[in-house]
Image (cartoon, grey):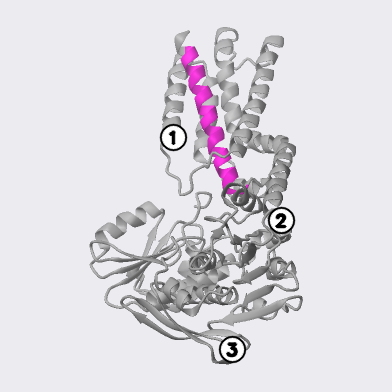
Amino acid sequence: MALIITLYCICGIYLLLNFKRDIHVFQQNSYRISRYWRWLRSGNLLPTWRIVDIALIFLLLTPFLWVSVIAVPITLIIKCVMIIKAKHKKPLVFTKRVWRLYGATGLLAAACYGACIAGAFICPGALEINAYFPNAKAAMLTPVCIALLISLFSWVFVMLGNVLMTPVEKLINRRYYRDAQRLLRSMPDMKIIGITGSYGKTSTKHYLHRILSEKYEVLMTPGSFNTPMGVIRTVREMLKPYHEIFICEMGAKQKGDIKEICDLVHPHYGIVTAVGPMHLETFKTIETVQATKFELTDALPANGLAIVNNDFEYCATRKVDNVECIRYAVTNTDEADYTVSDVEYTSEGTKFTINGPDGFLLHLHTKLIGDSNFSNLTAAVIMALRLGVSNDQIIQAVSRMEQVEHRLNVKRTPGGVTIIDDAYNSNPVGSRMAVEALGRFTGGRRIIVTPGMIELGSRQEELNKELGRHIAANVDVAVIVGRYNRQAILSGIQSAASLPEESIIIVDSFAESQTFLSSFLNKGDIVLYENDLPDTFK
């Protein structure tokens, strides 16, 4: 009897850990059932660990009572340990919403479990799991079989739990929204700057924060807090009466997302860093991406200012006539008000010049590398100039500016290897610039480690092939990680026919790439880590 009770306890722990694993993936899919279902259908409805559960259920249906009683708990213990010890690039964040979802999922599972057990008592023959032991074994192991069945369909309970909690979450979010509105209204003199774009918005936000901090008390949304709830949380938890400027990063995965944030914060100024083929799985077309990003400029007051990056076709061709608009560019400079010139790479960083109207020149030196960083810095400088930051203050801030983590972040190891970390959210333009920046290095082998790019919709294969061609033209060794984009990248590399086959390394995981590099790298080598896919991608 003690063994059976122990088995029940192990089943309960396993069930809770299974729910945790499913909620973790659900969180990575932004709590959106459509995205979660898309992930499940992409080969995750019946992974190996669920097949093991099916095998255990079949074992329970055999006449081997003691084999079941011993094999099932041992297997479940092993699986529990594996779940607990699993390493994740982005761990589950136990927010209050997660706890509420966890509770709702658990209640639904408990209700289902209770209904099945009640059915077993009401109709004993209906849930007998073994004809050889219709009484003893069914009574003892039916609860285990039910628990494993619930575990097998744990993703269903998570989605149902989310549906159940949707009205509650809306009520809570509405209360938080009104609280953030109240706080913002209480500071009418604070200037609010919105920053959006398919890429470059986070780096631009950090650079602008660093420059403006030379003169003002500045708050910015931290990390990737660029959703409505992320902005609300920033305002409620971090905004202080002494703040003079609030820099609000605005992300979007579908039309209306930027407008929703603008309706909350009412920005006075806006920066659009890029319009490109990102999140096409939800946006569907580049025109929808353009319309969504420019929801920021459309929301600006008549006395505000829009700053737009003309290096992108869908930025340069989009008229902004409701507010003053300043345009900047690094490459497509014909119609730009501010441009970049005289770029010079040195051992201590980069020198470049920002050119503006009426002969304006600003000579800058920075530790940052890459054309994308010059572009992001230019946008920040334009905004700082409008807000009265002096040239000397800008020069000082830029010279001391630290690289944003995982965005062309350069480090040198004690062994003399240069690491370029561009692992966050790779995109077609940013990846090309990063690869070209790697190509400018000399003195050692230029090595890229990449799994390619994601969320590009129907252009996924095409753009990863293009990445492969850039890799072939700029690097000495390519380490292709995982299977998700492998064939497309290889096809691009091979079409360029400039990278020897022995210089193309195929690995299944990031850990495997590190094992390879540990015995391959020499002093002077340069390694670019371009993108790092989340746990939901292989």
**Can residue 26 be found in the magenta stretch?**
yes
Note whether residue 49 is visible: yes
First reached walking from the N terminus: tag 2 or tag 3: 2
State left or right for residue 119 relative to residue 96: right
Residue under pointer 2 = 264
First reached walking from the N terminus: tag 1 or tag 3: 1
Note whether residue 492 is visible: no
Q: Please tell me in which quadrant of the rendered image residue 351 appears.
A: bottom left
Which of 446 and 359 lies nearest the eye of the viewer? 359
**Can residue 94 be found in the magenta stretch?**
no
Q: CA distance from mark 2 to mark 3?
A: 34 Å
State left or right for residue 70 relative to residue 204: left
Residue under pointer 1 = 84
Residue drawn 74% across the image and 58% down it = 263
- Which amino acid type corresponds to the residue marked 2 in the rendered image? Leu
Q: Secondary structure at mark 2?
A: helix
Question: Callout 2 environment at 10 Å: few (<14), some (14 to 19), or many (20+)?
Answer: some
Boundaries of the magenta span: 4-30
Task: Report x, y in % for residue 49.
Answer: 50, 36
Figure check: 61 above or below 369: above
Question: Callout 3 environment at 10 Å: few (<14), some (14 to 19), or many (20+)?
Answer: few
Task: Report x, y in % for residue 450.
Answer: 43, 63
Residue under pointer 3 = 357
